[in-house]
Amino acid sequence: MSLAFRNEIDITVWLAGAKIADVAIQPRSRPPLTRLFAGKPAQSLLPVLPRLFSLCSVAHQMAFLSAVEAAQGQEVTEATARRRITPVVVERLTDLLRGLFVGPFALNGTSAAAVRAVLQASTVLGSASEAVSDPLRGEALAQIKAALAALGMTGEGQALAPGSALATYVERGGGEGLSPPAVEQSFLTAADDLEVVTRLLADGATYSDAPELCGGIPETGVWARRARSEPVPPAAGTAARLKARIAEISRLCAWLEGVDRDAGDGAIASYRLGAGKGAAAVECARGRLYHAVSLDDGDRIVSFEFLAPTEWNFHARGPLVRSLKGAMLSAGRRGQDTVRALIGSFDPCVGFNLSFRETGHA
């Protein structure tokens, strides 16, 4: 399959002296799913989705399968629904681990072995299937927890061992070069699902390219999930977001061990929107993912749309822009690196290009 679409986000930060005056985002272009798959049998798309969506491929498959079943009017048993949640939670955990440790995490002699152990065990966990025994999954989880403990994760919550590799990493990326503004935050939740999927099915790419709810652009992802259980500060910098990611990793490990059963709440939801029309939402690492489908009488695709978390968080008026616009920035490389770290903490599902310009040079 050869697809021509731009899979990067361009971010321009406009500076007025030490203040971020504005932030301009040129979003990625997304695959036109209806044009690609109209007329094809719905079930034939399941093996194609992992090639089309290399990140969160399990979440995309579960979202599409659940949306198709809703369109067909199928009732999913409680046992099947529970069985599907586990691979979604596993993928969320492995994606959060890779996002934390691949790339920005600086390796040294004491942390390299533990990081390798985390990534190797997460690969085992992520490749597990229904045929893989529980002891093997338990062994992978035990290896992950032991490696995380060696890096400074002391248990559930956001507490990190002082002086540990993780504590140093969070402190280094803590955003001393950036003073984010206090802003009114809003978050995407399962209560918004029905409005989102109804508009997604009705308006297609017009909506999914630039989504909104009542004129606002809510945030989705780790920070939004944290806000469900506790108050969050009005100015959320890189350090706070990294700590929230670390705390969620701990909770997901506990869920897979059968200790914390709340982590899977709302992981998959489906909605029947009329005859031959259905949608689903899946909570993945980066936030809430939506699929909406319309089928003909032969269960062939009439329309197929998706809305990923990145379209909310990297909206031209979205959470990232609100977190940067009006912030005070340290001069030179230090301030620029801090902005880059904050963007990375929003965890886009594609690469991004970052540039800085002075407003007088517009």
Image: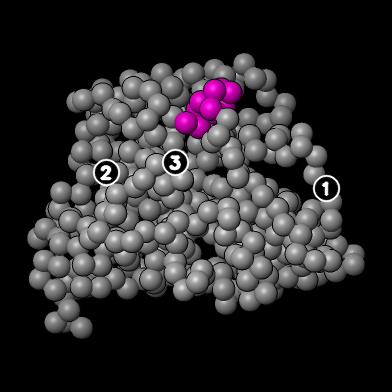
Q: Which residue is mark 3?
A: 229
Residue at position x 84%, y 51% in the image: 74
In magenta segment, residue 255 = yes
Q: Residue furthest right?
A: 297
Residue 34 rendering spot, x and y as whole percentages: 69, 71
Q: Is residue 71 left or right of residue 196?
A: right
Residue 333 can be seen, yes or no: no
Disc ID at residue 239? 2
Residue type marked 1: Glu
Q: Which residue is mark 1?
A: 75
Q: Earlier in the sequence, mark 1 or mark 3?
A: 1
In magenta segment, residue 101 = no
Above or below, 306 relative to 243 = below
Q: Nearer the viewer, mark 1 or mark 3?
A: 3
Q: Nearer the viewer, mark 2 or mark 3?
A: 3
Residue at position x 84%, y 58% in the image: 72
Q: Earlier in the sequence, mark 2 or mark 3?
A: 3
Q: Are marks 2 and 3 in contact (CB under 8 Å)?
A: no
Q: Which range of residues does the magenta coloring cover?
A: 251-260
- Nearest the viewer among 358 and 210 is 210
Residue type marked 2: Ala
| Real-space CA distance between mark 1 and mark 3, rounded to the nearest whole angstrom | 31 Å
